[in-house]
Image: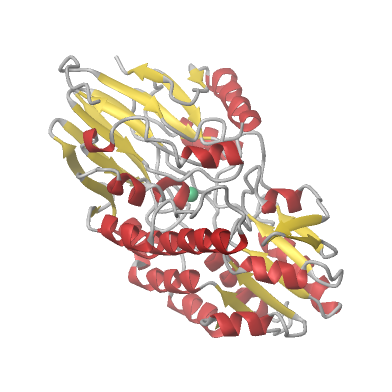
Amino acid sequence: MNDRSVPHSRFSLQFLGANATVTGSRHLVTAGNARVLVDCGLFQGYKPLRLRNWADFPVDPASIDAVLLTHAHLDHSGYLPRLVRSGFRGKVWCTEATRSLCNILLPDSGRLLEEEAGHANRSGSSKHHPAEPLYSEADARASLSHLHGIGFDHVFEPVPGLRARFRMQGHILGAAAVTLEFEGRRITFSGDLGRPGDPLMHAPAALADSDWVVVESTYGNRAHPQDGLEQELLAVLQRVIARKGVVVIPAFAVGRAQMLLHVIARLQDSGQLADVPVYLNSPMAASVGGLYRQYPRLHRLDGPALDAMQRITHVVESVEASKALNRRKGPMIIVSASGMATGGRVLHHLVAFAPDPRNAIVLCGFQAGGTRGAALAAGQKQLRIFGQEVEVGAEVVQLAAGSAHADADEILAWLRSAPRRPRKVFVTHGEPDAADALRARIEHELGWPAHFPEYLEQVELA
Ligand code: ZN
């Protein structure tokens, strides 16, 4: 099962996810006799991808010595409870803020998976009887004891002989690029690359000196408008408020929900936007909000900005209060997870508010293929939610400037910040068009060898 008879100084990389898709980030690094997994994400979106979550892990989890997480988003961390349940015994290294976020996110993920399995059992919609969750909340809590927080820019050894260092990457609290050095050879994993001008997060640090770079390409074929978010959001909010409608914003609970509330607070405080009620209906987003005070150096918001955000936000706690919101009349703004409308409380709001043309659904951030968010963005007029068809009469707006990911020019600028040209760049974490467009630009504009690896492809770092 576990072949440890590899030559001593072998250094290799295998792509176990995020190939031609933005989800399921997992990269297996072999350094001598040790195995280290960089990111341990869930596959989301199209069903054939989601089924990979259920397949046996490509190598025996017990043979992996350590895991390093670039950040807490579930497509980078959400498989961890399953890995631990399947026999992984080592440490999981991440930044302190990533650890704090995982403490909130992973148990919530387990609880949602249990709820989905329960729902499938009640409705008879699963082929499996009984339907089992991928992992439970208890599995997720058990996995948390493996997490080991480490400061940005500290050099540490996840396994003997392999040196590692996290550098700030913007994107969300705690997000990092990680550089591994083994016998004089260095590889950097970008994780998810933030934006230099993000309203919430700091600009990413420069790319470290590296022989190989694994870079994300979510927006590898797109350009974000510059500084347009506030005006883009203001325009749609004003339109909907004028017709007394409801704005439903499916938002990623970690990062985008807080960014939106910050911008809405600024618009209301400056008098540009009417003081309509703003609801945050995501208990997880509410707990995450507290972490911005715990890690003041990791983002751009000062005390008064955090106070303003808190002042305008009505946090919806109970399920009853969440249901009551669906009976309220507009104008009002509801920010609720999940960001691609794949699950969470926002689904109930879509059932209630999507049919009425006075309302709007505002999408913020990347909508992976196969999700309801992508269907909405593509103009689909019907959504399937809880086994029923929901008409979409509401205006659908996708905020072009709302992303927490760098666009193609910003990714190239980050690559150019390296002190020297790497030997090769591996382009991952993008749908095929985006990944291949970025690969071509790296080759043509930077003149660096670039490769778009396939799922399970293995490369020697020699
Ligand atoms: Zn992310």
Nearer to us in this view, 412 or 1: 1
53 to 363, vertically: above or below: above
Q: Residue at x 38, y 43 (%)?
A: 40
- Quarter of the image for residue 436 reads top right
Q: Residue at x 30, y 29 (%)?
A: 29
Q: Percent x, y for residue 118?
A: 51, 63
Q: Residue at x 73, y 56 (%)?
A: 384
Nearer to us in this view, 333 or 349: 349
Q: Percent x, y for residue 107?
A: 38, 63
Nearer to us in this view, 79 or 125: 125
Q: Percent x, y for residue 307?
A: 48, 81
Report if residue 133 is visible in the image: yes
Q: Percent x, y for residue 17?
A: 46, 34
Residue 156 left/right relative to 41: left
272 to 370, vertically: above or below: below
Position of the N terminus, as image quadrant, is top left
Residue 375 left/right relative to 457: right
184 to 348, vertically: above or below: above
The scheme the figure's colours follow is secondary structure
Residue 240 left/right relative to 453: right
Q: Residue at x 46, y 45 (%)?
A: 42
Total tally of numbered discs in the picture: 0
